[in-house]
Amino acid sequence: MIAKSVSSLTAPALALGYGQEPKIGSVYLREADEVAKALVEASAVLRAAQYEAQHDKLTGLANHTLFNDMLSQQLLLCERMKMHMAVLFIDLDGFKAVNDRHGHGMGDQLLRAVATRLDAAVRSSDIVARLGGDEFAILLIDTGRADAHRFAKQLIERISAPYLLGNLSICVAASIGIALFPETAATPEGLLLAADEAMYQAKREGKGRSVVAQVLTP
Ligand SMILES: Nc1nc2c(ncn2[C@@H]2O[C@H](COP(=O)(O)OP(=O)(O)OP(=O)(O)O)[C@@H](O)[C@H]2O)c(=O)[nH]1
């Protein structure tokens, strides 16, 4: 009975080690039951830590780390399936003025509201991330140049519509850089860098617009 109870914890303990959820049935012994409960708790702690490491605390969106992982995965898939993909680098225009005029708390609320609009604008297969500060990124799967450009244009309009926060109506705009797979670059780093540079070009050209990146790789 004791041996059976203890050995029934082996599989759940291994599952925990592999990052899976431990499934624990009846263990028949009070001491073994305590260990089982500890394993379940450890699993929850591990999952929470994993979620925190991959998500932006303020908006709940994917963070830089998760976005890079997803970008690498999707790139391999698109390569195999001969599909196109677009990376959008989005930076808000005039966000600092919102912080300066209405305070950091209101700036945070605005970032959350922008995140909600971005999330609502994409398909469930696409990925939205906050890279940091007022920078966001979107990965559009199975999307070519014309569709990415149209999407970015609509997104700028959506972002620029006034936000009703408390009793204030706040406006902010956005500049977007677009990099395309496979035309612009064929690596995750190359795509993100090209989209970032295109975003800066959009800023230089007057903000509130999108620019498609030049081809970086021969
Ligand atoms: N409220 C809030 N502000 C943040 C956060 N992270 C960064 N910031 C602020 O966001 C601002 C971003 O700076 P910029 O991108 O230069 O501001 P901007 O006015 O949008 O400038 P342009 O991009 O040139 O239009 C800085 O003032 C940061 O202090 C955050 O989590 N919350």
Image (cartoon, helix red, strand yellow):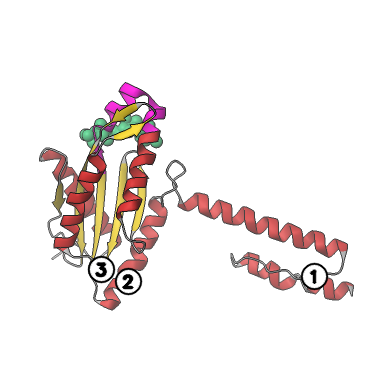
Crowding at dot 3, Cα within 10 Å, few <14 / some 14-19 / many 20+, comes out as: some
| Magenta stretch encompasses residue 106 | yes
Q: Position of residue 44 (x, y in %)?
A: 63, 56
Mark 1: amino acid:
Ser
Ligand 1 near label 2 (Cβ, under 8 Å)? no
Which residue bears the numbered disc 1? 26
The residue labelled by disc 3 is 142
Magenta stretch: includes residue 88:
no
Q: Earlier in the sequence, mark 3 or mark 2?
A: 2
Asked if 17 appears above or below 131 in the picture, the reply is below
Q: Which residue is mark 2?
A: 76
Q: Nearer the viewer, residue 69 or 86?
A: 86
**Which quadrant would the N terminus be assigned to in this image?**
bottom right
- Residue type, numbered disc 3: Asp
The number of discs equals: 3
Q: Earlier in the sequence, mark 1 or mark 2?
A: 1
Snapshot quadrant of residue 102: top left
In this image, 66 relative to 156: left or right? right
Whether residue 82 sits left or right of residue 108 in the image: it is left
Report, in whole angstroms, how far the alpha carbon at label 3 lies from the one at label 2. 13 Å
